[in-house]
Amino acid sequence: VASLVFNRAKVEPWRIWFFVGLAAGACLATLLQGRLSFSLDYGAIGLLLPIGVLLPILFVGGLLMGYGARWAGGCTSGHGISGNASLSPASFAATVTFMASAIGVTFLIHALTGGAL
Amino acid sequence: VKLAGFAFGAAFGFLIAAAGVNRYDVIHRMLLLQEIDVYLIMGSAVAVAAPLLMLMQRGRVRTLLGGPLRVSRAPVQPGNVAGAAVFGSGWAIAGACPGPAIAMVAGGAIPGAAVMAGLFAGVLLRDAAVGQAATAGHSNAASPRTSHTAAGTTA
């Protein structure tokens, strides 16, 4: 695991700056909307689950997304927006698939929680 | 290029938060098919970007990194579908995809940090799985990745 983390190709600086910019931009927009407050709130699922259950579930969600996006070669931005705008067949296929899977799993969650989510 | 990276990131993050797509409830209602706003946002982004990309390619615009802009059109590979299916289930659980997850934390929702941690772990895990399959000598081990760097992509 250590070699996996440390022996990686150097990340191009603009990617890191893009990441920093994304956070800064989001922070500014939230501030302008007048609802910037750091809290443990996380919408409906945050109200339903205690934080000790919520965080592991969110981690698993992130894990699946990271693994899946790497495998698929992109996410909702890379395939969903950039790729489709490039008229890339791989992106059409990926977008149709993740939309179907996300909607399917969301309805499953809806059913399993008895409509609470 | 660093400044441009920051500027494009800031614009992207600003729009994500302004549109509210970094909120669990918004994404969850979208995926429950109760609201169509987010589909319209994605659709309009694609509708604007597609002709611009085509014009830029025709006009031989050079990218900020110096190379010619080449719009990549990758053929479908099995990984695109299998990976996307895994990605979609994670998206449904977390109610946030990678870009908005960052915007979520920056917008004050601290639990979003668990999503971000999972994202990094997931990417590392995938690379480990691919690396191991490659050293084990499977011929089809390489991850079928497409590159959209020309159009600018997120983590």
Image (tube, grey):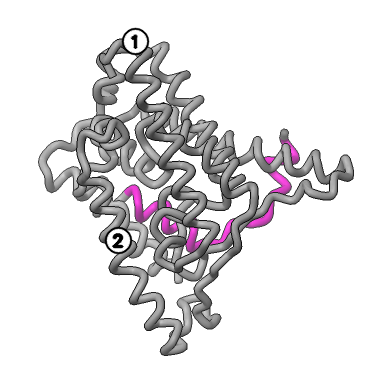
Quarter location, residue B138: top right
Q: Which residues are magenta?
A: A2-23
Residue beneath disc 2: B45
Pick the front one: A4 or B115: B115
Which quadrant is home to the N terminus of chain B?
bottom left
B2 w.r.t. B55: above or below? above
A114 w.r.t. B8: above or below? above
Relative side of A83 to A67, left or right: left
Task: Give me the chain letter of mark 2.
Answer: B
Q: Residue at x 41, y 11 (%)?
A: A52
Q: Residue at x 54, y 70 (%)?
A: B72
Instruction: Give the x, y percent position of residue A84.
Output: 43, 61
Q: Secondary structure at mark 1?
A: loop
Task: Report crowding for label 2: few under 14, some 14 to 19, many 20 or more residues within 10 A (C-alpha).
Answer: some
Task: Report crowding for label 1: few under 14, some 14 to 19, many 20 or more residues within 10 A (C-alpha).
Answer: few
- As drawn, the residue found furthest toward the right would be B137
- As drawn, the residue found furthest toward the bottom would be B59
Q: Residue at x 50, y 38 (%)?
A: B87
Q: Nearer the viewer, mark 1 or mark 2?
A: 2
Instruction: Give the x, y percent position of residue B124.
Output: 64, 39
Is the stretch drawn in magenta largely helix, strand or loop? helix
* Dot 2 amino acid type: Ala
Instruction: Give the x, y percent position of residue A44.
Output: 25, 21
Q: Residue at x 28, y 25 (%)?
A: A42
Relative side of B24 to A93, left or right: left
Label of residue A28 in the image: none
Instruction: Give the x, y percent position of residue B35.
Output: 20, 38
* Dot 1 amino acid type: Pro
Residue beneath disc 1: A50
